[in-house]
Amino acid sequence: MGPAPPDDGDTPVQVVLDALDDPDCRAILREASQPMTAKELSDACDIAESTVYRKLDLVSRATLVREFHDVHPERGRITRYQRDADGLDITITDDGVDVTVDRPARTVDERLADMWSEMGDEL
């Protein structure tokens, strides 16, 4: 679901604004302070699970959430989603509008997990 966040925190303006304009996306961002499955987000936000997946796609394209993949011995691959923004800066410039997403600092373990996840997506 969506590309990894850019290293510099810059994200296309309209994609971020579209996600923030959607009340379901905002609800997901509020609830996803810790990794949660789509089912858990559906229950917490009182949104149909099929809708949660569409909204997760939108906030993923805006690079406002990150995905975690686990393998459960009985249920297979489990994806969890967590908010990946501490704040947003919107700047009006002579060339237009810029949006910068402030991201939480990642531990070495989290960066390694991100790399491992990306490798798994390529397989």
Image: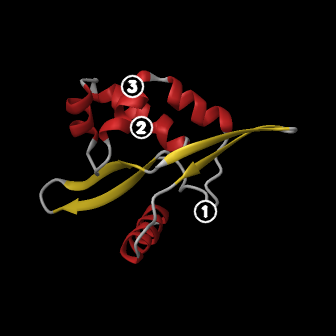
Instruction: Name the residue nearer the viewer: 99 or 51.
Output: 99
* Alpha carbon distance from label 3 to label 2: 10 Å
Q: Amino acid at mark 3?
A: Asp
Q: Residues within 10 Å of mark 1 (few under 14, many from 20)?
A: few
Height in image: 26 above or below 117? Answer: above
What residue does disc 3 label? 24
Q: Residues within 10 Å of mark 3 (few under 14, many from 20)?
A: some
The answer to which of marks 1 and 3 sits earlier in the sequence is 1
> Where does residue 97 sit, x and y in percent of width and height?
75, 36
Q: Nearer the viewer, mark 1 or mark 2?
A: 1
Q: Is residue 62 left or right of residue 93?
A: left
* Alpha carbon distance from label 1 to label 3: 27 Å
Looking at the image, which residue is at 41% across and 71% down?
116
What residue does disc 1 label? 7
Q: Amino acid at mark 1?
A: Asp
Q: Residues within 10 Å of mark 2 (few under 14, many from 20)?
A: many
Residue 54 at least partly seen: no
In terms of image quadrants, where is residue 113? Answer: bottom left
Looking at the image, which residue is at 36% across and 26% down?
51
